[in-house]
Image (tube, rainbow, N blue to C red):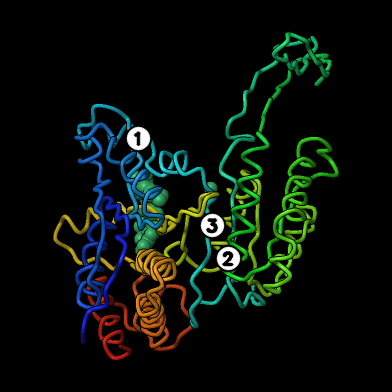
């Protein structure tokens, strides 16, 4: 078979530990035999971030801005233990945080559904994509402990020096207070990212907050979403046969649980943090969650939602075979290759991505899977594979499909 050609390079961001090992195996077994892979390679492994003073992360983000599509391996976000383990000169920032700040995007997470791994919620038939606003609110809040009796106010000082004040509380005794903010520009970008992703994937968009209680703060989110939808997206949504609707967060939670799935659920920062863990767990496994960062100007960075699977890596270093699930990392590659194919008008590249996904899903549905899935599957006959065996089985199926 002749290898599939690419026009524009993908931005390839390598990573750490077990996912770095899987990354190479996926390329060797599932990509390079079939595709003349064109990538611009950035090594975001901790050693290279240290060597370059983390410049490599910034360069990778800038390359994503230039080319439009990136695929990223999971990376270590250093803590004190990692500083010691890797002899770091600094506790480098989270690469995902750095990339998100430069691309200014929204993260969309969706589960990969396979027969035999049933969601805990029986009526969920299609994936629920969770879109989390990644700026502000409680994550950028200022907090204070109030020691005793006294007044606490919000004060806004305009550029001309004039002040607007609002009483938070007249304390009679000790308490706590929190001041949080968001900016309209970020909320507008968030809304556009969600609507664009809805159009892109032909799914309805739901957005929910607590505007009945938060009449200024959450209501502003609701108003901005509605204004942008009416002005820029209404007609295109009608054409695509999809809808946008707003509801209260508590109503949304009830509807989500009763739904069949198949839509995008846009959440404020905190709601997204909490609800994405709920949705991922209820669908069965973190190792089966995809994640894509979409910038307001339409740049895409694909990755797996899980981390570097450190515990398995130490087993690997001891020379043991591990049964680490590579599915979300495979889907990061297929997501990126499909998007590259669509942008460059390369139908065969997009089709290859679909076939690789199909081969992966069919391998699991035929009973071959990694240990994490074997523990939760409803399939009666299962072969537990190590990562290499599993990827080998996918390659066989893929070759047959092609
Ligand atoms: P993790 O790598 O997601 O792994 C946590 C546990 O979940 C694993 O020990 C494993 O459970 C299970 N697991 C996750 N992915 C799996 C897979 N593909 N196959 C099988 N089992 C899987 O999270 P972590 O251990 O908290 O973090 C490790 C490192 O990853 C940290 O340095 C963190 O900074 C980094 N991290 C990076 C990203 C990112 O780059 N996007 C995201 C999160 C964390 P068992 O051990 O029970 O088998
Ligand atoms: Mg969380």
Q: Gap in Å between the C-alphas at discs 2 and 1?
A: 29 Å
Q: In this view, does 119 lie above or below 133?
A: below
Q: Does the residue labelled 3 lie within 8 Å of ligand 1?
A: no
Question: Which sits earlier in the primary sequence, circle 3 or circle 2?
Answer: 3
Q: Mark 1 points at which residue?
A: 79
Question: Which sits earlier in the primary sequence, circle 2 or circle 1?
Answer: 1
Residues at circles 3 and 1 in contact by the CB criterion of under 8 Å: no
Examine the rendering and report whether any part of residue 41 can be seen.
yes
Residues at circles 3 and 2 in contact by the CB criterion of under 8 Å: no
Q: Mark 2 points at which residue?
A: 282
Residue 265 location (% of width, % of height): 65, 59
Q: Is mark 1 within 8 Å of ligand 1?
A: yes
Callout 3: 10 Å neighbours few (<14), some, many (20+)? Answer: many
Q: Is mark 2 within 8 Å of ligand 2?
A: no
Q: Name the residue under label 3.
A: 108
Q: Gap in Å between the C-alphas at discs 3 and 2?
A: 17 Å
Residue at the spot 39% in from the left edge and 64% down from the top edge: 336
| Foreground of the two, 137 or 174 | 137
Quadrant of the rendering where the N terminus is positioned: bottom left
Residue 213 location (% of width, % of height): 84, 40
Quadrant of the rendering where the C terminus is positioned: bottom left
| Foreground of the two, 113 or 30 | 30
Tell us which disc is closer to us: 3 or 2.
Answer: 3
Residue at the spot 19% in from the left edge and 59% down from the top edge: 316
């Amino acid at each position: 078979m002749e290898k599939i050609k690419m026009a524009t390079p993908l931005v390839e961001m390598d990573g750490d530990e077990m996912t770095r090992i899987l990354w190479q195996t996926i390329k060797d077994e599932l990509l390079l035999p079939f595709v003349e892979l064109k990538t611009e390679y950035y090594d975001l492994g901790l050693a290279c971030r240290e060597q370059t003073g983390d410049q490599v992360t910034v360069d990778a983000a800038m390359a994503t801005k230039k080319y439009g599509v990136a695929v990223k391996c999971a990376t270590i976000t250093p803590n004190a233990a990692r500083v010691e383990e890797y002899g770091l000169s600094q506790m480098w920032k989270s690469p995902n945080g750095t990339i998100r700040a430069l691309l200014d995007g929204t993260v969309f997470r969706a589960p990969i559904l396979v027969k035999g791994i049933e969601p805990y919620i029986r009526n969920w038939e299609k994936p629920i994509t969770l879109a989390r606003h990644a700026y502000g609110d409680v994550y950028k809040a200022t907090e204070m402990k109030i020691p005793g009796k006294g007044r606490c106010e919000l004060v806004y000082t305009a550029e001309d020096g004039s002040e607007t004040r609002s009483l938070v509380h007249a304390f009679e005794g000790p308490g706590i207070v929190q001041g949080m903010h968001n900016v309209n520009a970020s909320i507008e970008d968030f809304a556009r990212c969600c609507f664009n992703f809805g159009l892109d994937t032909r799914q309805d968009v739901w957005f929910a907050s607590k505007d009945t209680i938060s009449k200024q703060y959450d209501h502003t989110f609701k108003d901005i979403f509605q204004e942008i939808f009416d002005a820029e997206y209404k007609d295109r949504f009608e054409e695509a046969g999809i809808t946008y609707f707003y509801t209260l967060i508590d109503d949304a939670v009830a509807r989500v649980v009763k739904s069949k799935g198949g839509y995008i659920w846009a959440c404020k920062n905190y709601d997204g943090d909490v609800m994405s863990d709920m949705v991922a767990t209820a669908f069965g496994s973190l190792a089966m969650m995809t994640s894509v960062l979409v910038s307001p100007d339409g740049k895409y960075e694909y990755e797996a939602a899980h981390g570097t699977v450190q515990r398995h890596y130490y087993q690997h270093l001891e020379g043991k075979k591990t049964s680490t699930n590579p599915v979300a990392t495979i889907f990061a590659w297929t997501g990126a290759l499909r998007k590259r194919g669509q942008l460059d008008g390369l139908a065969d590249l997009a089709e290859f991505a679909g076939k690789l996904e199909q081969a992966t899903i069919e391998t699991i549905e035929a009973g071959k899977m990694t240990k994490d899935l074997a523990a939760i599957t409803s399939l009666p006959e299962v072969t537990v594979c190590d990562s290499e065996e599993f990827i080998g089985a996918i390659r066989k199926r893929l070759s047959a499909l092609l």
